[in-house]
Image (cartoon, rainbow, N blue to C red):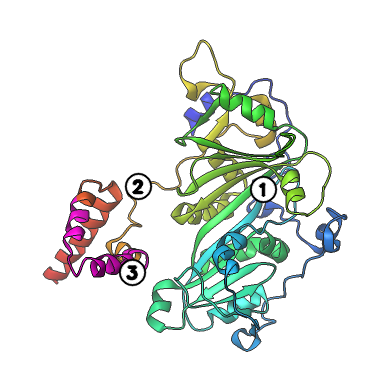
Amino acid sequence: MSDTKERGRVIDGDSASLVQELGAADALSLRLNYDRRERESQYSGERGGGRARRAPTAGKYVGANRIKRQPEPLGGDDAVNIITEHESQASSLAAPRGAVMVDYLRAVLPSEAGMLSELAGWLGVFDERPIGWRGWYTESASVLDGGLVAWCEDEHMAERQGVLVDLPGRACAALGERLVPFLSWCCERGRVRRVDFALDDRRGDVTFERLSAAVDAGALVTRARGVRWIVGKVAESGERIGWTLYIGSRSSEACIRIYDKRLERIERGAGDCGGHWIRCELEATGDFADALAREVLKSGAAVVVEQLNRRARFTEPSATDESRERWPMASWWYRFVGSVERGASLMCGEDMSATIERMLEYVRLAAAPAMAAITEARGGDVSWFYELLDDGQHRLKSKHHAAIRAALSRGRARARG
């Protein structure tokens, strides 16, 4: 960390440290101010009075005997769009000044006796749905405000898949001040598979113009291969009605999104909150999400900013220094993130998460139907399969070789035993 401290500089920086000035180093100082008064008063003009159902106290519900069935199955366009609609359920809460907010949580928990009852204690009544989820789970239920719990009835599938908890922004907001304890419980009982951390600019430091100018000038220093803009405009006038800057790909384990939250609210009919509101989200998935969640719980919200700085920094280009890594952070970006520190890798060492067993399960669930269809269409000829194997052999990555070595090592150990 010492070398990053030496490199870290800021142009015309002031003392307005959004994260540090309010003591966000404490793990529970994520300051998720989701209590009833916060929800009712933060934006009083919100439709429905801004009220959300308060999460129940632990132990109030006892699981399956409190599950209610939804009367009608989902089909047609609802079935096609259900995943996108579920994940896009954004909350209308802003991260308080100096705070980092959890805005999405996905976890997989072990499928064991009493797990659904424990979850009901945290999440409340299960509204059972007549469908599963993503083809991986045969049963599912709605919880909180737009949240989802999914599981498998078959014992062997349940052992492999576990119990899924998927809470978009609105569901996270409905958990209120119990969200951070629930995140901690998920880390104790299972693994986090997605977590989004959000920082909000309400002072006008981050703007579309500044971001666009920095990207065009090459002042964005990032580990990502590329950036992508999505800009919405009125067809007749060309007026900008919304925008999002993606840094990195959502298919990777870390992606940064910066967008105009005020315009997003207007577009989805939530009303105009008034004033400047730009949101920056660090979306973490897979093993990185689990590692990040645990580190935040251990060391505090400053970890999020350090990981953000590790992946992207808006800088002041230097005509005398060719090393982009040494370029000083732009003052407007510093006023927003409040730190120049760059975090260390949370995924040190050889990645052993891609085991042969997991690869086989992935092929079975994702590719087996396509493989069967191709084989049947070709009258049982499987020569195409060996062609794919030959092609894949030349595209093996380090994680694949690591998984092969681990599987061979376990095989030799069993043979000696």
User: Disc 1 residue type?
Assistant: Val
Local secondary structure at mark 3: helix
Task: State the residue position of label 3.
Answer: 369
Residue 6 visible: yes
Q: Kindly identify which numbered label has been placed on residue 117.
A: none
In the image shown, does 157 or 315 lie closer to the viewer?
157
* Magenta stretch in the rendered image: 363-390
Quarter of the image holding residue 91? bottom right
Query: Along the polypeptide, which appears first: circle 3 or circle 1?
Result: 1
Residue 166 percent location from the top left of the image: 57, 65
As drawn, 225 above or below 400 = above
The furthest residue to the top: 320
Task: State the residue position of label 1.
Answer: 100
Task: State the residue position of label 2.
Answer: 349
Question: Is residue 14 magenta-colored?
Answer: no
Q: Residues within 10 Å of mark 1 (few under 14, many from 20)?
A: many
Quarter of the figure with the C terminus: bottom left
The furthest residue to the front: 236
Residue 185 visible: no
